[in-house]
Amino acid sequence: MSNADLEKRPADVSAMFDRVSRHYDLTNDVLSAGVAPYWRTRTRRTIDPRPGQRILDVAAGTGTVSRILADRGAEVTALDFSEGMIAEGIRRHGDHPRIEFVQGDATDLPFDDGVFDVTTVSFGLRNVQRPMQALREMLRVTRPGGRIVICEFSTPGNPVVRGAYNAYMTYAMPTIVRAVSSDPEAYDYLFESIRAWPDQPELARWLREAGYEQVAWRDLTYGISALHRGVKPLDPTA
Ligand SMILES: C[S@@+](CC[C@H](N)C(=O)[O-])C[C@H]1O[C@@H](n2cnc3c(N)ncnc32)[C@H](O)[C@@H]1O
């Protein structure tokens, strides 16, 4: 997929993730220089999963976050539109009693209103063609007073860190990707999508616009990623 394809056509995005599904998690760990597990732990702490809680993991991929949440006792629905990612997720975690994999589209969630205590999305919203529609859908399926937690690449605030990070993305990452990935072109798309993604305040604005309140974020690793959170109003009409 070339840089010009950033309109993120759903069929292309889904097919791309089908192709990388088998080595996706390994490539992620290598590319993030080992910090991805730390970001996932921070995501889990922010979600604070409890036994009996119903959590929807949107664009769940191979279910890495779903697994961490389900291991804490939550009932997790892992939704993704890539058949390949879902198949890999089922291969790894399909026998877990509290994870259900569902193939579906984040912009048209196949669930009733207000059925989840928490919805979450890790490194997925950036890939969705209509992210505002996905945020509205996540709000719809959350119970009043329930929460959203988003973990996504973001923008380092410190110019020195930003410069070093951009240099890593431009020069080091492509070399690493060619060595470890089964589909280096897919990662060209990844870099471009990170560059085009809104910064922390803008994503917070999107959340408010979608209808969330108490919106806040926390930088991870100097803002290379960020954790955004919000709450569905108890009375959305108030
Ligand atoms: C970078 S992966 C992230 C996977 C996982 N959340 C993780 O943290 O490892 C992005 C995922 O978003 C999924 N995706 C993109 N657009 C989607 C959509 N509209 N509906 C459902 N899944 C989508 C892709 O299939 C892919 O599995």
Image (spheres, grey):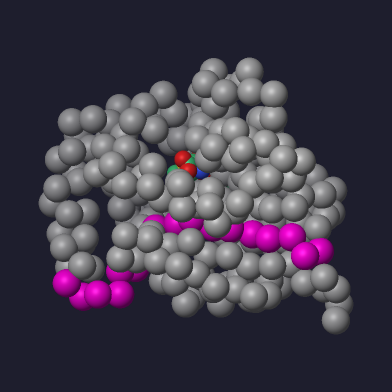
Residue 66 pos. (x, y %): 58, 37
Seen at 32% across and 38% down, the residue is 29
Residue at 28% x, 31% y is 181
28, 13: nearer the viewer: 28
Which is more toward the observer, 238 or 15?
A: 238
- In reply to whether residue 210 is colored magenta, the answer given is no
The image quadrant where one finds the N terminus is top left
In the image, taking residue 112 as reference, residue 185 lies left or right, namely left
Residue at image point 66% right, 52% down:
119
Measured from the top left, where is residue 194 in percent x and y? 36, 58
Magenta stretch bounds: 144-160
Whether residue 163 is situated above or below residue 96 in the rendered picture: below
Coordinates of residue 20 in the picture (x, y in percent):
39, 30
Q: 17 or 88, which lies in front?
A: 88
Residue name at image x 62 percent, y 38 percent: 72
Give residue 182's quadrant in the image: top left
Whether residue 183 is visible: no
